[in-house]
Image: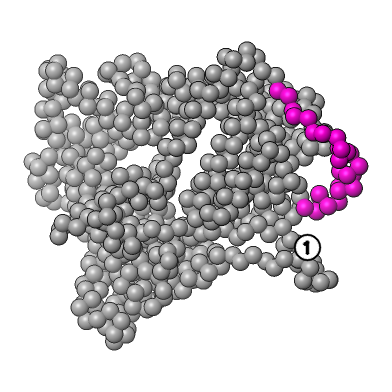
Amino acid sequence: MRVLGHGRAAQARLVQITMHDGRCRLGVEKVFRPGMLTLFIYRVAFQAPFAYQHNANAILACFYRRRVAGAIVDATGTGTRVAEPLYVRWDADTQAFVLGSEFVRGRGIVPQATDAHGVRRRFARKFGDESKYPAKPPQEIHELLRVMTELESLFRQCGLEGSGWQVCKRAMVSTANLLRTCAGYVIVDLESGIPAVLVPSYVLGGMRLGALPPFDDVDGAKLREWLDANEGRLIDSLCRKRYELLRGDAERLIEHSQAWKQGELAVGRNKWRVFGATCREQFKARCLDSWRRRDIIDEQSHAAMQPGRRIFSRMTFLLGMVPSAPGRLLQRLWANRPYRDKAARFLRDAEFRRSQIQGFVAKHTKRWRDAGRIARQRNFTGLGISFVMNAILATITPAGVHRWLSDPVHRHNVLTRMMLICVSARFQSEYGRYLIRSCIRQWEDAGRLTTREAMQLRRQLDSNDMDEYVRCFGMHMGLKLLLPLLAPLKIGGGAAFIASGNLWFLFLLFLMPACRTAITLWRMLGGKRHAADYIDALLVGMLPTVGTLAYPVQMYSKHPELSAFLLRDSAARLGRWMPIYGGKDSRVEIAAIKLVNFVAEALEVGLASTAPMRRRFARPADEPEAAPQTIEFSTGRWHRIADEQLRLIAESEAASQTLGEFVAEISDSDRPARAA
């Protein structure tokens, strides 16, 4: 129905599921299609493809791990629960396994409210009167970390080492694995993307289990002992029937986990056993199962390869060492007779060749559209130069650069908006407000702003004295529209400096700060406002990366709530961008948002210290404030162009439907499931 998000190892999709009894309910499918970095890390660690993507035993271990963990959490009365797994299946379109589970309507962490008195409160606690400062705002993350600590201790006690890693507060990104609902916290992710090597205790635990590096491991002996020791308590909490189900699920979890782990080379885990016959047999069975499921080999080849233990010297295995799609093509040509016949027909039959090419082109075109790389209405007639160029761009460029180069309409709109930012006061103002409204809506959708707080921010945004700040903020943010053009210049400038040592090439690295400084100087010299209204923005705008925060810093004296919100939003984006440790609702993102407290306090102290100077240079009370002037070229024409672009922006804003609104439109047949 829609994509909910992307992780390091999987994509989460909202789906509508029809149960065996005919009932419909909402669910979430995790499609395990990891990125290149995750694939590389797993390949280096275990000398095997990413397990959850192609290994049947691994995906079944996911299913039973959730059932076992869910029953144990329910029985121990922690006040939390695990999202119920519903099924696993093989998805032919994506060539990957899928784990289906219930859809949980919850939210992530709400960051601490802005605290602009933290440092001063701390000093006052030691040397003065702390009561003159407001109380410290509560931090929801402390409650979440307490819950995670309890869950981690429980999972490690019962032998679910991998599940403990998924709720370990020291893992930095694990806070995103729980959602808060009206009934308490729900664990929605128990599947790792990378090995648990960032916390020493888990490395030591992996050494104890003989699993290095550790990755979603289960201590089978410890799990059985824990279930035996707590049998009476579990039966009282779960009832006899569910306890028997738990014991069966635990045995299946241990069985599938062992088959999965022993089916990989994983020298760090299997050590000398990789040279034994049993290891070769298990590795061969996994390879044959994966090849058969992905149609790399046919039934005859599968039957021919099954006898004996030989696998590493077979041509199918050796051809698979060629990376990516070329390797799979060679494997299919060697070991799949129907595929060879199909390839031969492709060469002989023009009509068949045309249909296959059209299907190939349509498949990749749909993928590029879904990723926002090409226009929705873009089509390709065949394997022409246009399609080949887009295939190359899809491989080597980010989505934004690809869209810029491939879509002339998008490129025209971007350049038009850049021109309007220079010449149209109305567009500057509306574009800046559009950007800020989008940020407010995203925080409100995520539950980080209440409806009242969002309405207050919107009222501040619509006030008349905000117009100049919003316009300049829109111009600064509008410079990001040129990133597809400026990125090659910055890369080229850095390379030229390294090659020649000429410092002038470094100027290309500071094109954005130079443009922001020019805009602020233009408004300072050409506008009717006092120069003091631009000093802070001028200084901050000169800085790389954080220079886009120039006007949020400048507006802090008059609109501290809106200014603090924009600063926090930018900090959150930086925290989500951080590789490996970052992401939505990660501790890195929450810490980045919390750092804005120091910025807000520094701004308050700075404003207080410079208040006398600001009053001296302030405009007299009886002097009317003149509206700032912006040069307009060909007023009628630019107004028409601005109207058109503002209409497109309004349509884009209206199309940004929230998840809550989307779910609310679904028929009442799944309402009991959504209430859960």
From the viewer's side, name the closer residue of 434 and 519: 434
The magenta stretch is 604-630
Type of amino acid under label 1: Arg
Which percent across, then down, holds residue 144? 50, 67
Q: State left or right for residue 412 relative to residue 253.
A: right
Query: Is residue 170 located in the magenta-colored stretch of the structure?
Result: no
Residue 515 point in image, percent of width and height: 69, 27
Residue assigned mark 1: 120
- Number of other residues with Cα within 10 Å of mark 1, as a class: few under 14, some 14 to 19, many 20 or more: some
| Number of numbered markers | 1
> Which residue is farthest front?
622
From the viewer's perspective, is residue 46 above or below residue 615? below
Which residue is pictured at 56% across the width and 67% down the height? Answer: 142
Residue in the foreground of this view, choosing between 64 and 450: 450
- In the displayed orientation, state which residue is furthest to the top: 634
Residue 608 in picture, x, y percent from top left: 83, 52
In this rendering, is residue 403 above or below 310? above
Which of the 4 image quadrants contains residue 228?
bottom left
